[in-house]
Amino acid sequence: MRLQRRSSLPGFGITMGFTLAYLGLIVLAPICLLVLKSTSLTWEQFWQTVTAPRALASYRLSLGASFAGAAINVVFGFLVAWVLVRYEFPGKRIVDALVDIPFALPTAVAGIALTTAYAPTGWIGRALDPLGIHVAFTPLGVTVALAFIGLPFVVRTVQPVLSDLEPEFEEAAASLGAGRRQTFLRVILPTVFPALVTGFALAFARAIGEYGSVVFISGNMPMKTEITPLVIVTKLEQYDYAGAAAIAVVMLVVSFALLVCIQALHSWTRRRQGAA
Amino acid sequence: MSATATIVAESPRRLAVGEPALVRRLLIGIALGFLALFVFVPVAVVFAYALEKGFEAYVQALVDADALAAVKLTVITALIAVPLNTLFGLAASWAIAKFDFFGKQLLITLIDLPLTVSPVISGLVFILAFGARGLFGPWLQAHDVKIVFALPGIVLATVFVTFPFVARELIPLMQSQGKDEEEAARSLGASGWQIFRRVTLPKIRWGLLYGMILLNARAMGEFGAVSVVSGHIRGLTNTIPLHVEILYNEYQFAAAFAVASLLVLLAFVTIGVKHLVERRYRSRSPDHGPAPGGAKS
Amino acid sequence: MKPNRLVTTTILLSLAMMGSTRLAAAKGTTLLNVSYDPTRELYQEVNAAFAKQWKETSGEDLTFRQSHGGSGKQARAVIDGLEADVVTLALAYDIDEIAEQSQLVPADWQKRLPNNSSPYTSTIVFLVRKGNPKAIKDWDDLVKPGISVITANPKTSGGARWNYLAAWGHALRHSGNDERKAKDFVTRLYKNVPVLDSGARGSTTTFVERGIGDVLIAWENEAFLAVNELGKDKFEIVVPAESILAEPPVSVVDKVVDKRGTRKVAEAYLQFLFTEAAQEIAAKHFYRPRLDSVKARYAEQFTKIDLFTIDDVFGGWQKAQKKHFADGGVFDQIYQPGR
């Protein structure tokens, strides 16, 4: 990697050095080990493991539900952040605190609590069941759990950006005759967009690997509601570390590719904004 | 909704760019409705179960020796993981936001990597490295150094899982802020540390705070990865989340949720701290921009 | 250079904290018993009784550490370096794997103690809702259309593997050893399963707390515990005419006890499990005792049942695991698409 610094600011050496050393030690070295482990399989074995019908079905569910969950969070997470930053209402601080709950709650507890609420006998499930909406033990339940764990990512990445947004810009837009909708689309959204993308990426990435909260609500039916991390666990249960590593590597590659795409989108919008 | 009827009056200047009261109430209503479905109800479930057997049983569950040991271990783990990853976040965001270099996008993406790794695997990688059959296993055993199934393993797994939090919060923020002010300070002869302390830090403090709050919450709440490296020894290597699972599996539902509610309360405490910090800053330097979540003036 | 100092201070402090935090060192000897989920209550009592006896006979203070979790996960932890003095797991296969993967115990570990090294046994029974509204009496009732059966995922739960094998064994015996018919039987059985929890206790919760399912397939001791802890007036136990003999095995982990110098006490502890005092405790916790004297005293509690063993029907755990639960095995075939 060729490093070039085009900045008059100091501190590049130490911060970059520390970043790379820490990243390498904590993240890259262990992940290399994981990849190394999966190479103890032959190529055919590897391919067979990662393209088994059960594995394929689990990718579909994990990716689909993660995407849906993250998309829900982008819409409602933005709304929550907006409401928390812009408006005053009683109990706002408590609501603000509650946004972090999906992180603070151990995922297993979250899974149990969500299942309790959404099972046919639960507080919410009881209301939804007569409408023919079954949440617990269906792919919808998986989506609910993944939306739950991803929420703080979107809210907490958008919140600081929104509160840094100077009202002057909006005022200027308004004084130039822009309607509220135009101001929102042309001024607010572009500023918040990078944060939204980041939030989406984080929520999505987190959701793909999530295990603890999902196993309770998913029902774990092979081919139907079996998430990829569960497939990994079943491999481990057979002492098949290499097979588990193989599936993990596939997940890693897929989510890494997605992150790269999102990152590219991110910098593209930034460049466009810079040019505008 | 009576909750939204008491929206505090705002200055006329704000109203010029704000939404009509009706829209505002509607938005608040939708946001709260969404949160109710996804967050409030599960939390209510936790407390409903926790207090099922009365307040006394609730307290009893919390002062149990194993529960206290779990709290202690969790706090120690967070006390190590949070500063380390905060430091990393600051360093990484400074290098990334203030300088141009080849491979920057790759670096940002690599920082996100731990998030995409399933917690099951995050634990496993450290077993592969430090387990008895792992890469360093034989050496560690020969020197009687314990990493997995002991504190270092738990800390490592936690650090890995919470790795990107501060960095991810700060990078977009610092990128959007540019570096003009820092360069101005530089041209006035400020040292790097001074620039960071006086110019950058005040601008990023809310993002930093949010990042640290998330980091801490996640560090204390992590279950999957820690579960793999902990060994589940009661009163010794169980963190709060693992202790909750154990109690739950013993059919002590009330006690399990009581201990889990500790983590909910923790979220409130951290937000309380956040508000205290905000207020202090606001009263000290009113011109330094509005605080997130606080009323704009 | 202040930033430099900040970096080094943080790292040094972190390392110092990790190093200085000696996690509660107990005085005297400690024994770590790595066990599976449902034995918590059992070993709590057994440990106290043995520690008292050990103090009386040797004068030594003995502290127990307990670790509980899924049987396979616990075995993996031991293989990967969790220093268990003794393992008390759900199935012999898991200790076999410890022997095979890490040589921490010799391959013939199961011959070292009486009764295949399993001091107590259990079997697989049904838990139904009060009054048995669906009139479930035996295995054949489980495959009837419209019956909702709760069991855990045998790929992730050791207990659920016993459930599966019990059903298979029943079908095999009633079809004149026709494997095709047995496979058809378990396929129909699992078609009736709406939720496969990842662990045995999870499926108990699904049945009891969520109110899902007409019948829960469970260990006998778990069924008793669920009835006693979660509602005597809500559930009842149905014992099928025949079932599998579940033999949860125990073993000393040789390499660990030799390293820690705890072999003597660890072996005495496992021997103790076969004594009258410990058998009594086991029976109290609804495990079927081995000792005839204790058996006689608890005859009322444990319904007589025709039990077959895994060795008889499946030729041992290794074969059963490979054929049924490995990837591509019979259980996977049940869920193959197009069926």
Image (cartoon, helix red, strand yellow):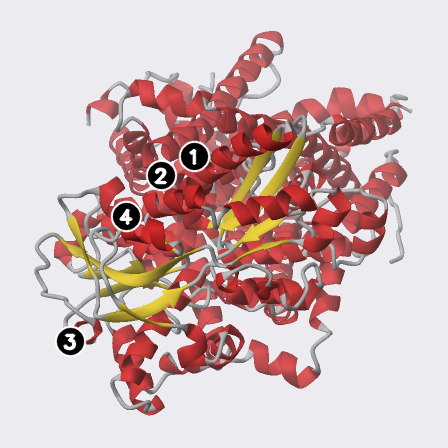
Q: Determine crowd level at label 1: few under 14, some 14-19, many 20+ residues with C-alpha closer than 10 A.
A: many
Query: Which of the labelled discs sits on residue C145, or is there none?
Result: 3
Q: CA distance from mark 1 to mark 3?
A: 45 Å
Q: Earlier in the sequence, mark 4 or mark 3?
A: 3
Is disc 3 placed on a helix, strand or loop? loop
Is disc 4 placed on a helix, strand or loop? helix
Where's the N terminus of chain B, which quadrant?
top left
Q: In x, y percent, where is residue B118?
A: 57, 56
Chain containing mark 4: C
Along the line of sight, the residue nearer the viewer: C289 or C287: C289
Residue contact at pointers 2 and 1, CB within 8 angstroms: yes
Residue with the mark numbered 4: C297
Up/down of B231 relative to A88, above or below = below
Q: CA distance from mark 4 to mark 1?
A: 57 Å
The three-letter code of the residue at mark 3 reads Pro
Residue with the mark numbered 2: B39
Return the residue found at the far front: C293
The three-letter code of the residue at mark 1 reads Val
